[in-house]
Amino acid sequence: MRIVIPCETDQLLDAPRSGHFGHAPWLIVVELDEQGSATSVEAVKNAEHGAGGCGNVIAHVLGLDADAIIAAGMGMPPLMRFTQAGVTVYADRSVATAGEVLDLFRRGQVTRMSPDDACRH
C-alpha cells in the first residue's frame, strides 16, 4: 500500500505535516507491506499549485500510484477526484508529524474524509 502524507519539509517521517493538501511543499510517500511495516519512505516535491490550481497537484499525486492520502485539510474538488480514481482519503488533524500520523493509520485511528470534512474556499 502506498500512502501519501502532505508535509512542510522533506524530513521523511519527522516532517511536519501541512495544514492543507494542495499547498503542501512536500509529499511523504510511504510504502507499507501486508503487515503494515514501512518498506520505503521517500520525500517527493509537490507540484506547484499555481495557474493549474489543485488540478496540477491532483495529477501529480495520481502519478505516484497512491492508494491512500492522509491529509489535515483538503478541498472538495481534490477529495472527489481522488475518490473517483479509487484513492482513499483519510483525515487527521491531531498529530504534528508524518511518522505520528502513520502510526495512527496503522492502529486504525484515522477516519475517511467525508464531503462534510472538506475545506470550503
Image (cartoon, grey):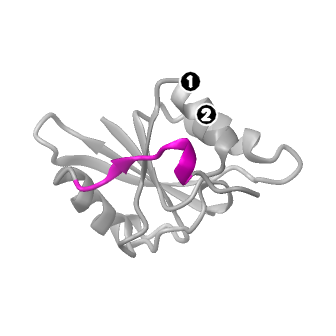
Residue to which mark 1 is pinned: 84
The reply to whether callout 1 and callout 2 are in contact (CB within 8 Å) is yes
Q: Quadrant of the N terminus?
A: top left
At x 16%, y 54%, the residue is: 107
Residue 37: x and y in percent read 16, 48
Q: Amino acid at mark 2?
A: Met
Q: Amino acid at mark 1?
A: Gln
Image: magenta residue range: 109-117
Binning the other alpha carbons within 10 Å of mark 1 as few (below 14), some (14 to 19) or many (20 upward) gives few
Above or below, 54 relative to 20: above
Q: Is residue 13 magenta?
A: no
Q: Residue furthest right?
A: 51
Mark 1: which secondary structure?
A: helix
Q: Residue furthest left?
A: 35
Q: With 76 as the anchor, is 42 left or right in this view?
A: left
At x 47%, y 24%, the residue is: 86
Foreground of the two, 25 or 55: 55
Foreground of the two, 12 or 5: 5
Residue to which mark 2 is pinned: 80
Please tell me the numbered disc located at residue 21.
Answer: none
**Alpha carbon separation for disc pair 1 and 2:** 6 Å
Q: With 3 as the anchor, is 83 left or right in this view?
A: right
Residue 108: x and y in percent read 20, 50
